[in-house]
Amino acid sequence: MFTPHSFATALVMMVVAAICWGSWANTFKGVKHYRFELFYWDYAVGIFVMSLALAFTMGSMDGGPTSFINNLKSADAGNLGWVLLAGVIFNLANLLLMAGIDLVGLATAFPVAIGIALVVGVVLSYVQEHRGNINMLAAGILCAVAAVILDGKAYGELKTGKRATRRGILICIISGVLMGLWAPFATRALTHQNALGPYSASVFLCLGALLSCFIWNFYFMKHPLVGQAVDFRDFFRGPVHGHVLGLLGGAIWATGMVFDLVAAQFTGVSISYAIGQSAPMVAALWGIFAWKEFAGANTRAKAYLVLMFVFYILAILLVARANTAG
């Protein structure tokens, strides 16, 4: 299988991963008057198909025991179960994130949700394995929490309904908690004996996400967080470009997932995790500059946004430094 043999290659892959993770939601924003529950069926297919495509190309290069199929044959069945569970949890978190995007926009939903996920992920990692500088980790958590609060306050300055704001932020917080919960299960599958490789783990995580759509997505279609209930027949009445963008969005996210896991084989999980967590900054930039979500915002809102970026970057740097400092 393909793995990077230099830090420069690994760094490029991690940066591409962060850009992919911060950019895929633009495909949903690009579909007008189309429900996210319907868009998500194509998205879920897209992540699975792309993960398979990368597994059978990059993940099968040169054969050998670590290639995709050979790795699957040698991996423990328990590890397959753990990564499938990770996909199920991720999928619920991601559906809630899309509901948050619908309510409060990219520039708010991503930093709030992934900021909370960063906090949960760091705490769980430290509880599982007392590794890293506790003072730096604590400082990183405080900075992440500050960034989430600042982003929420920036959105609160906009002339939107207070009820919609509170509901959207709450959904993003719940999404963030769940986003922080799935990673330990995937990490277990990647690190325990007869472990899965990055390509195999990606395929089964995406498969878990796709299969769980028949639970989570059907539930939200019948009990929507935004708007009225929709029927599965509405999916087939959707615009062609909506289906295409859904598949594209999934392919973009899956590319980021695979690239980040593959890069971690060279750099270690702590560095790839930290760089991957810069994705919300990419999403926020798209929301602010491409989708004009803060157009006409007052000076106070803009100041909150600037401070949000500063504190989020500090959180990422502190967490990465804490993990490498030991």
Image (cartoon, helix red, strand yellow):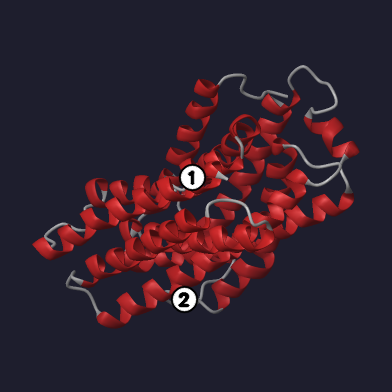
Calculate the distance from the C-alpha at mark 2 to the C-alpha at mark 1.
35 Å
Q: Which is closer to the viewer, label 2 or label 1? A: 1
Q: Nearer the viewer, residue 11 or 169?
A: 11
Which quadrant does the N terminus fall into?
top right
Q: Look at the numbered disc 1 and give the secondary structure of its residue.
A: helix
Residue 146, x across and y down, in percent: 33, 64
Front-most of residues 73 and 24:
73
Q: Where is residue 260 in the image (x, y as percent from the top left)?
A: 57, 38
Mark 2 or mark 1, earlier in chain: 2
Q: Residue at x 16, y 59 (%)?
A: 303
* Amino acid type at mark 2: Leu
Check the picture and name the quadrant holding the C terminus. top right
Q: In terms of secondary structure, where does tag 2 sit?
A: loop
Q: What number is the disc on residue 320? A: 1
Vertically, is 321 above or below 5?
A: below
Q: Pinpoint residue 244: horizontal percent, then vertical percent.
A: 49, 43
Mark 2 — residue?
A: 225
Q: Quadrant of residue 231?
A: bottom right
Q: Please, what is the three-letter code of the amino acid marked with disc 1? A: Ala
> Which is more toward the observer, 6 or 204?
6
Does residue 207 appear anywhere in the picture?
no
Q: Which residue is pictured at 25% across the width and 70% down the height? A: 153
Q: Is residue 70 above or below residue 162?
A: above
| Vertical order, 181 against 197 (above or below) | below
Q: Which mark is residue 144?
A: none
